[in-house]
């Protein structure tokens, strides 16, 4: 994609194997809207690569559909999140209530409403981002990591962080259908008005033709099986 030819390069913010169901490597805007700095945003989940449909949870699909799933039954829930770049913490919002169980229809309804009808003049930013951290990497360059587990954020405003430093854990707070990490680069620390910036990851591995292949400055596509150690 032409507008992704010169992305900003950062380190992958997770460890282990991941899939990106929403990625600018497949479509732009990746989340169906340019609002809230999400034009080039990524979502990351963990799945069972051996099960049909690549479920992100341990229970059956029928249980997911009818009863929902406790968040601790999702493979990625509670996994550590790492700073993708050196910088300074400019926002670290914790304490937002995290749902204990996913409920497909109500969660989809809330997600659509928040994504398309969010009003920065009256709506709480955390209703969308949940518990989140924003790192200022340089002038007009900010990294946002959203939907973190309540009580997991390990950094505070004004703190300097190094690339690869643990900042929190994956949760299901805010505008989230299920536990996952939402990651984006922006031109402002204000999510409600920021414009998204394209980014790629300096190094990860892609599972291709039954082997792991190293990728540099890559942009994962939908259904790519990737890992970073």
Image (cartoon, rainbow, N blue to C red):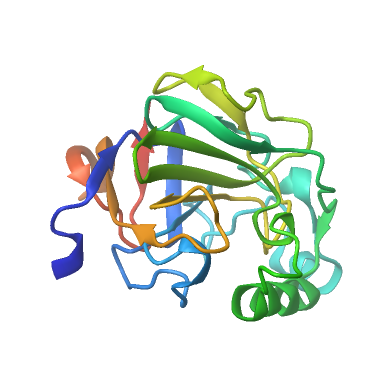
148 on left or right of 43: right
Residue 185 visible in the picture: yes
206 on left or right of 87: left
Q: Position of residue 140 (x, y in %)?
A: 35, 46
Who's the residue at 73% across and 51% down the image? 173
Q: From the image, which quarter does the C terminus lie in?
A: top left
Q: Position of residue 5 (x, y in %)?
A: 13, 58
Above/below status of 112 relative to 20: below
Above/below status of 158 relative to 171: above
Above/below status of 168 relative to 179: above
Q: From the image, which quarter does the N terminus lie in?
A: bottom left
Who's the residue at 13% across and 69% down the image? 2
Tell me which corner region of the image, top left, top right, bottom left or bottom right, holds residue 142: top left
152 on left or right of 226: right
Who's the residue at 21% across and 51% down the image? 7
Exactly how many numbered labels are in the figure? 0
Who's the residue at 46% across and 77% down the image? 32
Given residues 133 and 211, the one toward you in this image is 133
Given residues 116 and 81, the one toward you in this image is 116
Q: Position of residue 95 (x, y in %)?
A: 82, 39
Residue 210 visible in the picture: no
Q: Position of residue 223 (x, y in %)?
A: 37, 61
Given residues 72 and 156, the one toward you in this image is 156
Tell me which corner region of the image, top left, top right, bottom left or bottom right, holds residue 112: bottom right
Tell me which corner region of the image, top left, top right, bottom left or bottom right, holds residue 126: bottom right
């Amino acid at each position: 994609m032409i507008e992704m030819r010169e992305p900003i390069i950062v380190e992958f913010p997770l460890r282990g194997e991941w899939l990106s169901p929403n990625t600018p490597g497949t479509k732009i805007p990746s989340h169906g809207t340019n609002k809230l700095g999400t034009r080039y945003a990524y979502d990351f989940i963990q799945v069972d690569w051996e099960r049909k449909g690549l479920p992100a949870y341990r229970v059956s699909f029928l249980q997911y559909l009818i009863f929902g799933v406790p968040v601790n039954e999702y493979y990625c829930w509670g996994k550590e999140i790492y700073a993708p770049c050196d910088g300074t913490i400019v926002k670290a919002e914790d304490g937002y209530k995290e749902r204990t169980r996913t409920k497909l229809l109500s969660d989809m309804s809330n997600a659509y409403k928040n994504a398309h009808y969010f009003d920065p003049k009256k709506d709480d930013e955390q209703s969308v981002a949940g518990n989140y951290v924003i790192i200022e990497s340089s002038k007009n360059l900010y990294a946002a990591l959203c939907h973190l587990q309540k009580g997991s954020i390990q950094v505070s405003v004004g703190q300097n962080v190094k690339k690869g430093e643990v900042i929190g854990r994956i949760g299901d707070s805010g505008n989230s259908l299920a536990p996952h990490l939402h990651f984006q680069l922006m031109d402002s620390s204000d999510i409600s008005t920021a414009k998204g910036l394209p980014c790629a990851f300096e190094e990860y591995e892609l599972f291709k033709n039954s082997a792991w292949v190293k990728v540099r400055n890559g942009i994962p596509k939908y259904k790519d099986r990737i890992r970073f150690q």
